[in-house]
Image: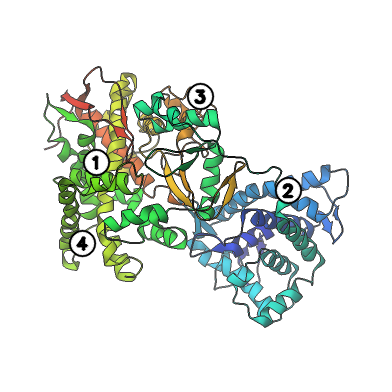
Amino acid sequence: MTRSGHGVMTEQLTLPDELVLTLLNEESGYFRQVPGWSLNCAVVGSALAELSLIGRIDTDMESLILLDRTPTGDPRLDPSLEEIASEPRQRNAQYWVERLAPRAEEILDQTLDLLVERNILQHHDGDFWSLAQTAWRTGFLTGSEVGTAVEFVKTRISKTIFNDEIPDPRDIIIICLIDTCDILRYIFDLDEEGEERVEQVTKMDLIGRSIAEAVHQNIARPLLRRTTVSKEIPVVPLRKLLFNEHSRSGNIPALFAEIGAEYGPVFELRPPFTENMIVLVGPETNHWVHRHGRTYLRSRDYMEDFEKLYGGVGLLPGLDGADHFRYRKSLQPGYSRKRLEEQLGPALAYTRESMATWEVGRKYPAVQLSRLLVNSAMSPLFVSVESQDIIEDLCIYKSRALQTHVSRTLPKFMLKTPGMRRRKKLINEIVDRVLSIHTPAQRAGCPRDFADDLLSMHGADRQFLPESSMSFALSAALLASMYMGDQVSFILYSMLAHPEFHEKIRAEADALFADGDPDPDMITAESIDVTRRFIMECMRLYPIVPMSIRNVMNAVVVEGYELPLGSRILIGTTATHYMSDLFPDPYTFDIDRYSNPRKEHLGSGYAPYGLGTHTCLGSRWTELHMALNVLLVAHHFELEIAPKNYELKINPFASMSPNKKLKFAVAGTRHELPA
């Protein structure tokens, strides 16, 4: 920490900090599109340059010399310094950039974490970043009164380029690194004079020149980085799919885990009557998709036909890049846990209204009962209307639409039957219901809902969210009841199938509702510990969205296999849930996986909400809402599995759900529902 002339405490930004802030594209929530290896070299180059500026090493065009092996105390710099100190021979900077490049991702992660910790950046689900609100008060960083952390760095660079000011060595190094990555022109509007000035600046400092040249040499010779030629992707015989026990039971994650164990992390499926698919499975491919998928894969291609069914274009599931980030940021408050907590009382009341229709002695289809249970609160909370009378038809239509136009497991004419045509009309019905009550007069004094958020987006930018897309946008919130309802059906089944956990969940529910409905601050990780971990284990064993589909927009090599341009990729994100090296005894129901010291869910192996930019936006809402549903059922009712000898079978398309044979019998009540 240092003190500025204004008497304001400031923090010194390191070169890795400044590189990240310069590369951050605030519109897309990610970095400027620097190829992975180029970014790695630039990040390592910034770390080496920082070591040079603080007197630990010296560099010139011929060599890199160790001056002081004393640790800096910065975890981003010290491992590299230690490695340089352990090398018996003197090497040049190019050698060290190439050797240390594999550490770049670790340095990048640590830098991002530090910038978030210092309230300079804010992290969003899906691995997006934006400036934190406190970062707009630049006095925190520089002692000045205007600008942001990003602007602080970019303004210095801009003055160096356009005002002919004498640059600081740090500014020269950043300009050298950014120029080497060939994206300076996209950050600053460079004319011919500006480009000449950049060329002049990059020659001013020997450290900057030597590091930049080392980075450039490693970027310019990509063939030298490949230790092997890309391998041929193995093809899985059709019989391996047809005769696998997990195919018969519908357990897609377990199926892919078993195939991956035999064929490796990348393999090809050639199913009849549809196009071939390349499948990615395993923790390494999950990590790659989460961190780098946005650069090479896109979702738009396979979503286009689905969007047309709803009359829209540019809908959230099919968006990529900056538009996707903008859409997510706009909708994030509507999907937040906080908004559900603010309406906890109504949420509990709506759920109990649905439960009040249950009759002791009757048996109900598990999936239908669970979807109605979830939707009873979601519909009024999200769009302020009742939709219990049509939600099942809306879910059936969406499921068929996904099967015909996304997963392509059914022919398209199956969406044009009389029943499907009738159900499609209900989309306009729900939109009319929502719009009819979302007028300024009727919404005055009402809690803000998701429909209000969407209508505000539409009013603010009618091209970004046009009226033609509102049918899907307004109905999508309700269709989340299909996914969450199916997950709840798995959870309730598992609770009834494991009486030892059922008793513990009941105890937590009874304690929570002992003195009436709880306040939000009473629903903590400790107060519902068993319920929370039980739900996590159910989502591991029965993830409702076990995979995602993308198209390759930029050819890339993953785990030694080339993914060709235009190929369709099936990402088996949850295959890792059944890999024993990540989850020992993966077929055993074990909620202790999520407690200290095991915590097996940490990392990219546990992915029930997806990975990468399309990670479920409503995961925090979903966690709380599902827990409330399970706790209310456990507190108020005695349910039983019907038939009693039922063996779980899964319907895998369009998402995973228990098959139609599973029913829940209402055997009795435990606590009366409030009048």
- Residue 13 in sight: yes
Q: Secondary structure at mark 2?
A: helix
Q: Which residue is mark 1?
A: 374
- Residue 512 in sight: no
Q: Which residue is mark 4?
A: 445
Nearer the camera: disc 1 or disc 4: 1
- Marks 2 and 1, how far apart at CA: 50 Å
Place of residue 4 in the rendered image (x, y in percent of width and height, measured from the top left): 65, 68
Tell me if mark 1 has few (under 14), some (14-19) or many (20+) residues whose alpha carbon lies within 10 angstroms of its own.
Answer: many
**Amino acid type of disc 2?**
Leu
- Marks 2 and 4, how far apart at CA: 58 Å
**Amino acid type of disc 3?**
Pro
Place of residue 509 in the rendered image (x, y in percent of width and height, measured from the top left): 28, 30
- Quadrant containing the C terminus is top left
Q: Residue at x 71, y 52 (%)?
A: 223
Q: Are marks 3 and 4 in contact (CB under 8 Å)?
A: no
Q: Which residue is mark 3?
A: 584
Place of residue 377 in the rendered image (x, y in percent of width and height, measured from the top left): 22, 45
Judged left or right of residue 267, residue 45 is: right
Mark found first going from the N terminus, 2 or 1: 2
**Amino acid type of disc 4?**
Gly
Between 495 and 96, the residue placed more toward the observer is 96
Tell me if mark 3 has few (under 14), some (14-19) or many (20+) residues whose alpha carbon lies within 10 angstroms of its own.
Answer: some
Residue 253's disc is none
Q: Are marks 2 and 3 in contact (CB under 8 Å)?
A: no
